[in-house]
Image (cartoon, grey):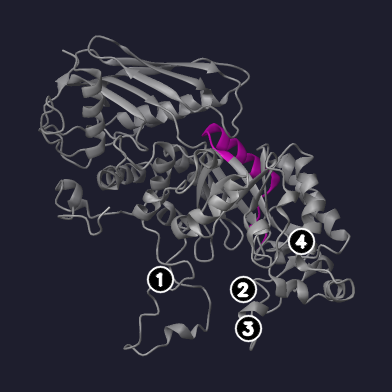
Amino acid sequence: MTSHPIATSHVFSTILTALLLLIHSSATATATATALPVNVWPKPTSISWSSPYTIATLSPTFQFDSPSSPSNHYLSAAVARYHRLISSERHRPIYDTTTTNFSTSPTPLQSLSISVVDLAAPLIHGVDESYTLSIPNYSATAANLSAATVWGAMRGLETFSQLVWGGRRRVPVGVEIRDAPLFGHRGFLLDTSRNFYPVEDILRTIKAMSHNKMNVFHWHITDSHSFPLELPSEPGLAAKGAYGRGMRYSVADVGRVVQYGYEHGVRVVPEVDTPAHTGSWAGAYPDIITCADKFWWPAGSPWADRLAAEPGTGQLNPLHPKTYQVVGNVINDIASMFPEPFFHGGADEVTPGCWKADPSIQSFLSQQNGTLSQILETFINKTLPIITSHNKTAVYWEDVILAPDVKVNPAVFSPEHTVFQTWNNGPNNTKLLTAAGYRVIVSSWEFYYLDCGHGDFLGNDSQYDRPPTSSDVDSNGGSWCGPYKTWQKVYNYDITHGLSEVEKGRVLGAEVALWSEQADGAVLDARVWPRAAAMAEAMWSGNRDEKGVKRYAEATDRLNEWRYRMVGRGIMAEPIQPLWCLRNPGMCNTVKPFVAQ
């Protein structure tokens, strides 16, 4: 007999919430203490599982029945990929379910039928990623996945793959899932300038993102440290700005990354940071770069007179006419290499000392009574139209209008054609930007910078040479943005805190970021996962339960199990608990919260 729909939804939600742990009989009047091997990450929006809880096996000839269309071959690629995954994965949950009593369907599941309303919908911000998944009970031989777009179908395929487990490829039946994301922008930023990442590392990261239903790979390609991107119109930038011949991305490499992203439902957003963070351009064009190759913080100078925010100096000179010829070529090439409608222009951390060190800028400031903000505004006024001429939406870091010293009049930026990415002052800056009418991507360092808390990379750093009795100078992890951002801190961040309903509607979503001063491919997976997965769920279905209570406690067990499954899929995510905790349900919890909510 099928339970009441509300009760079944609650039971199944409780099952997923507890992962493979015991469900207390107080959960619902009809619930029994049952351990169930089902876990979907990120947690779906709406789930029900009819009782009695029944499992089936996938037929040896199980197949996907999907539409084909010449207008979108990405669905076919996804179907083939998930068929291979389901055929080979054989995931075994960590918690022992051998003593669990399930009803067993005598009928193997033969197929998953996929229907898509709009096969031609492009992968852009705001595309409909919703889907419904139905796995009927008992005698039915086919499950059904329906989605508005190909991209929603990909999310449903991922959910179905996570419902399958064991050597016999078991799957729960009598399941109904209706799912859609809270936020349309669920991203990860990777800096490939400070340290180089081979293409295979990038592709593996995109694969991991798709498993977590993340949809934006923000590629911070260049910076002052290196220019690894080969551009047809400006070959000298990579030839003289990359770390070496084997540390460049060719046009073909970019095409491979972009194509792989489409096949996995992940947009690839390029960022070439200007006008600051451009020291690597000086090898090819020394005349348009100020303070290139200078020591970043001259001895005896106050912090205000530094030449860069960190070692690696150099900023484009907006007063040099050749600057715009080169920048125009760079933008035009990148716009043609990346079909993505968003183009990230950077514009963060313009350091006054670097521009002040240039004679032409000194003359402008003294003889024409000009300001550094006027110089930055000149640069934006000449380069923003180049970006928008390619029908791109310009994305900039918040500094360009919120920096305390060098900034542009906000009137320069049309809310219709501009998105700002915030990284400072948590929800306060999100409030400032959304209240001004701008769309915002949230990357607050206090919550979302995954590189923080691993020490600093400066040599000759005397702060570590202290008597053992002195105060703990390493309490922040030795880095400016420490301490380390735990997965719980990532998960619990409410990115629309303090916003009005109108302002909330201007928040596109969020990105976690890995700046690579102390990271490369050797540590990439463990540095990112499963912490990025924590943000993925918060952006997909939220970090609160149906009563509005934070659900980080029950998420611990689900994320723990999901981490093990990610490792099985080739993503070397770091553990969040001893294995003992999953094998001893509830024993690793605290008796009561450390801090009252």
* Residue under label 2: 311
Amino acid at pointer 3: Pro
**Mark 1 or 3, nearer chain start:** 3
Which element type, helix, strand or loop, lies under badge 2?
Answer: loop
Q: Nearer the viewer, mark 1 or mark 4?
A: 4
Q: Which of the pair 412/443 is nearer the observer?
A: 412
Amino acid at pointer 4: Leu
Residue 254 is inside the magenta segment: yes
Q: Nearer the viewer, mark 2 or mark 1?
A: 1
Residue 96 is inside the magenta segment: no
Q: Residues within 10 Å of mark 3 (few under 14, many from 20)?
A: few
**Dots 2, 1 in contact, CB < 8 A:** no
Q: Residues within 10 Å of mark 1 (few under 14, many from 20)?
A: some
* Residue under label 4: 376
**Dots 4, 2 in contact, CB < 8 A:** no
Where are the magenta residues, as a range? 244-267
The Cα–Cα distance between marks 2 and 1, rounded to whole angstroms, is 20 Å
